[in-house]
Image: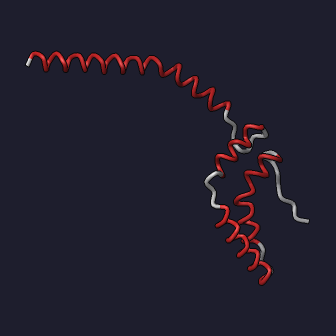
């Protein structure tokens, strides 16, 4: 019984020491994470690193399904004259890429 209490006491002391170490290291870890967050840009930032953010974002994007739906919208547009669904489908994908290359204040001007 004494051995069980001693083991429990040692485990409790170890957990307390671990908790204390974690609590005292949070300001340091938090400041490092904040700096890391500042280094990694958003997709709308005109920065070379934003290209890697864009690659990571679209790495798992299903381009085959996108192109299938885009071709269907284009075909419907040619039949009906209403190209709005195709344009919306296009910019659903291309908005981040255009923003990365042209900046966050780009706008579409029809000719």
Where residue 43 sits: x, y (%)? 71, 44
Up-down: is 80 above or below 68?
Answer: below
Judged from this view, the residue extending furthest toward the bottom is 79
Residue displayed at 91% across by 65% down: 111
Residue displayed at 68% across by 30% down: 39
Where residue 67 sits: x, y (%)? 70, 67
Quadrant in which the N terminus appears: top left
Q: How is the image coloured?
A: secondary structure
Up-down: is 86 above or below 59?
Answer: below
Judged from this view, the residue extending furthest toward the left is 1
Up-down: is 21 above or below 94?
Answer: above
Q: Is residue 1 left or right of residue 76?
A: left
Where residue 30 sits: x, y (%)? 54, 25
Judged from this view, the residue extending furthest toward the right is 111
Where residue 55 sits: x, y (%)? 69, 47
Q: Is residue 78 left or right of residue 13?
A: right
- Quarter of the rendering containing residue 10: top left
Residue displayed at 63% across by 57% down: 61
Count of numbered circles on the image: 0
- Quarter of the rendering containing residue 76: bottom right
Residue displayed at 74% across by 60% down: 91
């Amino acid at each position: 019984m004494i051995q069980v209490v001693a083991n429990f006491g040692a485990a409790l002391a170890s957990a307390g020491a671990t908790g204390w170490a974690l609590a005292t290291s949070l300001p340091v870890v938090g400041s490092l994470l904040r700096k890391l967050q500042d280094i990694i840009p958003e997709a709308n930032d005109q920065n070379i690193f934003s290209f890697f953010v864009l690659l990571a974002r679209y790495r798992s994007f299903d381009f085959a399904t996108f192109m299938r739906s885009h071709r269907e919208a284009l075909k419907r547009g040619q039949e009906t004259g209403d190209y709005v669904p195709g344009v919306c489908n296009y910019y659903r994908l291309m908005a981040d890429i255009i923003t990365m290359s042209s900046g966050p204040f780009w706008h579409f001007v029809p000719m």
